[in-house]
Amino acid sequence: MNPLTFEYRESALVDDVDIAHTASALSEYQKHLQNVSHSVGYDFAESSINLPFDTELHQRVADCARDKDTGNLKYIIVVGIGGSNLGARAVYEGLRGIINQPFPKIIFADTLSSKLFDDASALFEGLKEEEILVNVISKSGTTTETIAFGEAFIAALKDRMPRIYDRVVVTTDEGSKLWNSAKEKNFALLAIPKNVCGRYSVMSAVGLFPLLLARVNIGQVAEGARLLRDLCISGSLDENIALVSASLIHIHALKGSRINDNFFFIPELESVGKWYRQLMGESLGKERDTEGVVVHRGITPTVSIGPTDLHSMAQLYLAGPRDKFTNFVVASNIRETARVPKALTFPGLVGGIEGKSFVEIMNAIYGGIRAAYCVNQIPFMEVKMPSASEYTIGAYFQFKMLEMMYLARLTGVNAFDEPNVEEYKKETRKLLGS
Ligand code: PA5
């Protein structure tokens, strides 16, 4: 059963007829996605939808993890940026939170921060080789930030750990310069299928390998994704929530709401929001349409966290320009642990909280903002999931990746390239004199 409940009828302020009309423009593309789903290998731009079904891939990832997991692993350093980092990070932080992360922990090195480098180096003082694993991830194999951090980090570790090369796994395109260079040095290698670009790669070795090492049940992540893949390429609007949500976002964008706010009332999912930001930002933000005409299209994704951002952004959202369409993400079955005591230390300040669980209070806060959006006629859709689990996050990822493919098709842009990111990468290399 679909773990995601998608609701919009009362709140999105769009007629069913308009949704059906918009969705019907995608019927050919849906057929194409169905064909892709029946294909073997990764021949299509959309082939990432087959990753969760790829048992050979899961086997390769499991074999590599078995080789590298010494049973005494404490830290996995993921050196990668953008699509080579955000998916694994979203799952990891969604499940483990920020504070209580048991060993083996993942440290995400996605920025060239000297502080991060120094702090990580200090953390590894006194560690043995078997307690550390470095996973350098870069699809292109030539991203400046990743290669610079990876070089500096491996060099620093090499001084103390003569066999550190055995503790490095490189994930990249087969045949990339990084692949060839890593092969020469006998590093363990994991391949990213050619047609799977960074922001659609979370279900490949890019996301699966570090997560498996960190004891995440990647089988469940894939299972959630498999279910949503099948539902979201199907014909029926009742089941195909990606088709409906893409239609809603598109209709609102045409009416001028070109900001898509993703408002998570599950704070641990903030990184899922950041993953989505890349997915939407890079997939839809285009200078040219698929015909080559200059169009400067895009929808701006934002991430808000409830209730934190009610105290920073709600004023703007409720009273400011009507340029946003919101996607609320809420949990319907969070385990109730924390509770306000019956006997209060500060009685008489806030009524009605004594004895209530945090979940009950959070539900009231969500109910409050939901009601305020309705009263103010601010359009929104809602995704409810039982809780943040491997299964629900996997399902959410696949739902959103298919939503994005539909949206790109509706807006007439290529969902899978990022020519202008390449532009900055080239300029950087020039400035560095390479
Ligand atoms: O979606 C994309 O392809 C990009 O944003 C990349 O993920 C990002 O630039 C990192 O590139 P690479 O994985 O080649 O190092």
Image (cartoon, rainbow, N blue to C red):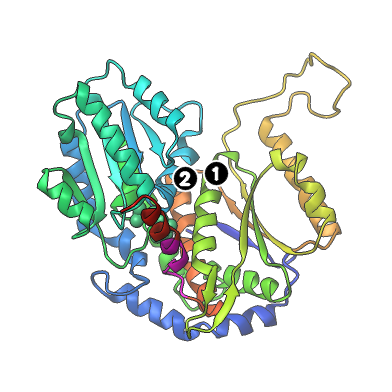
Is residue 127 a member of the stretch shown in magenta? no
Q: Residue at x 45, y 35 (%)?
A: 113
- Disc 1 marks a residue whose amino acid type is Leu
First in sequence: mark 2 or mark 1? 2
Is residue 417 a member of the stretch shown in magenta? yes
Q: Are marks 2 and 1 in contact (CB under 8 Å)?
A: yes
Q: Residue at x 13, y 49 (%)?
A: 183
Q: Quadrant of residue 7?
A: bottom right
Secondary structure of the residue carrying numbered label 1: helix
The answer to whether 233 is drawn above or below residue 224 in the figure is below
Residue tagged 1: 269
**Residue 84, percent across and down?**
37, 50
The answer to whether 357 is drawn above or below residue 304 in the figure is above
The magenta segment: 414-423
**Residue 20, percent across and down?**
62, 81
Residue tagged 2: 90
Where, quadrant-wise, is the C terminus in this rendering?
Answer: bottom left
Q: Which mark is residue 195?
A: none
